[in-house]
């Protein structure tokens, strides 16, 4: 079973670091160096970057907010769909607003 992690915001640089905690927390490691730019093929997305893990996706919106979605919070099918949309660069923002908006595990 993988280690469980939570993130801790280190001010003022806004970098997130791992902090090993009890298993009730999520498996995300989020740092701007690991996030990929969202292609935004349609041209009107509110998403700027994302990071994919085995059982999660972290999404950064244009306003700078980071949200962690995982299997526990949104379900495996929704997370896998979000990963596919993120990789293709089209439809992720719409999918989130329609199907998973409030099912995030954590606002980072």
Image (cartoon, rainbow, N blue to C red):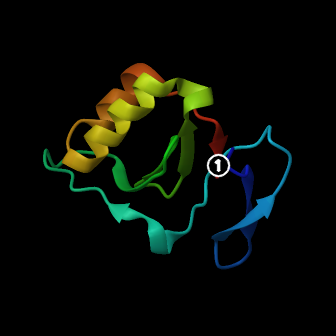
Picture quarter containing residue 94? top left
Q: x%, y% of residue 96? A: 40, 31
Picture quarter containing residue 7? bottom right
Q: x%, y% of residue 37? A: 31, 63
Q: x%, y% of residue 46? A: 34, 46
For image coordinates 54% across by 52% down, the residue present is 66
Which residue occupies the extreme bottom position in the image?
A: 13
Q: Evaluate whether residue 88 shows in this view.
A: yes
Could you tell whether 15 is left or right of 33 in the image?
right
Which residue occupies the extreme right position in the image?
A: 22
Could you tell whether 103 is left or right of 3 in the image?
left
Q: Nearer the viewer, residue 67 or 26?
A: 26
Q: Which of 26 and 64 is in front in this view?
A: 26
Picture layout, residue 60 above or below residue 85: below
Q: Nearer the viewer, residue 76 or 60?
A: 76
Q: Name the residue under label 1.
A: 27
For image coordinates 61% across by 28% down, the residue present is 73
Picture layout, residue 35 above or below residue 33: above
Which residue occupies the extreme front position in the image?
A: 1
Which residue occupies the extreme left position in the image?
A: 42
Picture quarter containing residue 78? top left
Q: Quadrant of the N terminus?
A: top right
Element marked by disc 1: loop
Picture layout, residue 60 above or below residue 71: below
For image coordinates 65% across by 79% down, the residue present is 13
Q: Evaluate whether residue 103 shows in this view.
A: no
Crowd band around label 1 with a 10 angstrom C-alpha radius: few (<14), some (14–19), many (20+)? many
Q: x%, y% of residue 81? A: 33, 31
């Amino acid at each position: 079973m993988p280690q469980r992690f939570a993130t801790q915001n280190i001010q003022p640089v806004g970098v997130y670091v791992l902090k090993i905690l009890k298993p009730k927390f999520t498996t995300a490691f989020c740092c701007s160096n690991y996030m990929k730019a969202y292609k935004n093929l349609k041209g009107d997305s509110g998403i700027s970057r994302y990071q994919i893990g085995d059982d999660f996706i972290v999404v950064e919106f244009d306003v700078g907010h980071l949200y962690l979605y995982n299997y526990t919070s949104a379900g495996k099918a929704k997370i896998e769909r979000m990963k596919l949309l993120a990789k293709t660069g089209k439809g992720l923002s719409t999918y989130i607003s329609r199907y998973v908006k409030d099912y995030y595990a954590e606002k980072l």
